Amino acid sequence: MAGSNITSKDDPPVGASAAKPKPAGSLSRFSLAVRALRHRNFQLFFSGQLISLIGTWMQNVAQSWLVYRLTGSSLLLGSVGFASQIPVFLLAPVGGTVADRYSRHRIVIATQVASMTLAFILAGLTLAHKVQVWHIFVLAASLGVVNAFDIPARQSFIVEMVGREDLINAIALNSSMFNGARIIGPAIAGIMVATVGEGWCFFVNGASYIAVIVGLLLMHVQFQRRDHTVSPFEHMKEGFRFVRNTTPIRDLLLLLGLISLVGMPYAVLMPIFADQILHVGARGLGILMGATGVGALIGALLLATRSGVSGLGRWIVVSTASFGVSLILFSWSRIFWLSVIFLVPVGMSMMVQMASSNTLIQSMVPDRLRGRVMAVYSMMFMGMAPFGALFAGALAQPLGAPFTTTMGAIACLGGSAIFGMRLPTLRVEARQLIIAQTAAAGDPPQEMTAREIS
C-alpha cells in the first residue's frame, strides 16, 4: 500500500498547541522518563487517573471474589468477564466513530460520570445485602457499553494532550500509572474484602472517579471541528478499511487479539488459583494480582525511558514469547511465593507487548482516523477478552485452571514466532508510515529518517 493514501492535507497538526519540548539529548534520564508531565493537561489527567484506577482495580478484584463467593463456579466467573467486555467488541467501532467526529475531551468526561454512577449502584446493592448474580451481570455489561466509548476516546485524547513528540512517553507513563494502581488496588481490596466485605471496595471506586472528573474539567482543551459530511457508517467503514490495508497495523492488532483471546483469561481464573490450587484466599488473591502489577509497572517504566520507536518490533516479539513461557511456569506452580515470582515477568511481558503495540499503531495512524483505529485496538485488546474469558471458564471446569492456562500460553508462543518471521517485511512499511505521519504533523522525521522499525 502506497504511503500517499494514508495522509490528508486536511488533518490538523496534532499537539500543535503544546509547548515545544527540549530535545531529548538535553534532558536528564529522569526528566526524559517523565517528560510528558510537562504538559498541564496531561498532569491533570495523570493525577486524576492514578486515584481513579486504584479504585477500579479494587472493584475488579472484589467483583471477581464476590461472584466466586456467591456461586463457586469458574463458568460464571468467565461469564461475568464476558458480559463486561463483549460490549467493547460490539460497540467500539461506534465509539471510535464518535471519537473522530466530536470532542474527545467531553466524551471522556461523560464516560467517567457514567462509570462512577454504576460503581455506586453496585456498592449500594452489596452493602444492603441485596446483590444477586444477575445484578452483577447487568452492571458489568453496562460498564462494558461505557468502555466501548471511553477507550477509543481516551486513547485518542492522549496525543491531543502531549503532541506526537511525547506520545511514546505519555503512553508509557499512562501504563505506569495503570499498573502502579494495579499493585496498590488489589492489595487494598484483598484486605478490605477479608475485613469489611466487597461493598466498600465498590464504594471507594465510585468515590475515586471524582478526582479524574475534576481533573478533566480543569483542562484547557481547544476542540477542532471535524468533517461531518460523510455518514457515520461510511466513517466507520473507512476506519476498518485503513486497518485492513495497512499491513503493520493489521498484524500488530491480530497478535494483540490472539494474546487477549488465549493468554489474558488467566486473570479470570485467578480466584481458582488462589482458592483451590494455592489455598491463600482473598488476601492471597490480592497479592497475586499485585505481583502482575509490579511486573507491568517495571515494563512500563522501561518504555518510559525510550525516546523513539526504533526497536519496538523486536520488543514485541520477545515480550510475547516471554509472556507465554512465564505463564506456563505460573500455571504449574503449587508454591504461593513461587507463583508470585512467576507473575512478575507475566505482567512485565504483557505490558511491554501492549504498550509497544499501542505506541507503534498511534505513530502510524493519521489523526483524523485515530479514534476509529483505536476502536479496533480496543476490540482486539478488550473485545477479544470476553470470548477468552468464556472459553477459559468453560474449559477450566473439566480440564482444570492450570491446563487451560497452559494451552493459551502455548498459543501465545506460536503467535510470537509467526510475527517474528514477518517482522523484516513489516518494518519497512512501518518506517514509511511513521515518517509520513510525522511530516503531516509538521515535525521533523527525527530518527526515523535514518533507521527502520526493527
Image: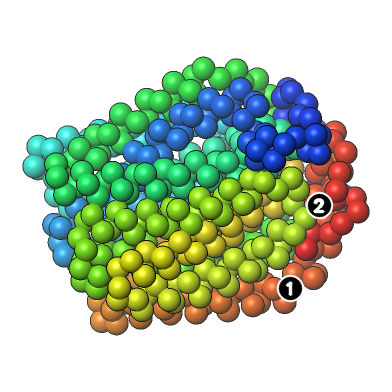
Q: Which mark is residue 33?
A: none
Q: Amino acid at mark 1?
A: Arg
The secondary element bearing badge 2 is classed as: helix
Q: Looking at the rendering, in which quadrant would you find the C terminus?
A: bottom right
Front-lying residue, 423 or 110: 423
Q: Secondary structure at mark 1?
A: helix
Residue at x 31%, y 64% (from the top left corner): 270
Decide: is 283 above or below 445.
Answer: below
Residue at point 50% right, 75% down?
Answer: 325
Q: Which quarter of the rendering shows the N terminus?
A: bottom right
Residue designated by label 2? 433
Q: Residue furthest right?
A: 450
- Image location of residue 445, percent across then percent down: 87, 43
Q: Image quadrant of residue 275?
A: bottom left
28 to 448, vertically: above or below:
above
Give how far across and how far down residue 320 sits, in percent: 58, 68
Q: Disc 2 or 1, which lies upstream in sequence? A: 1
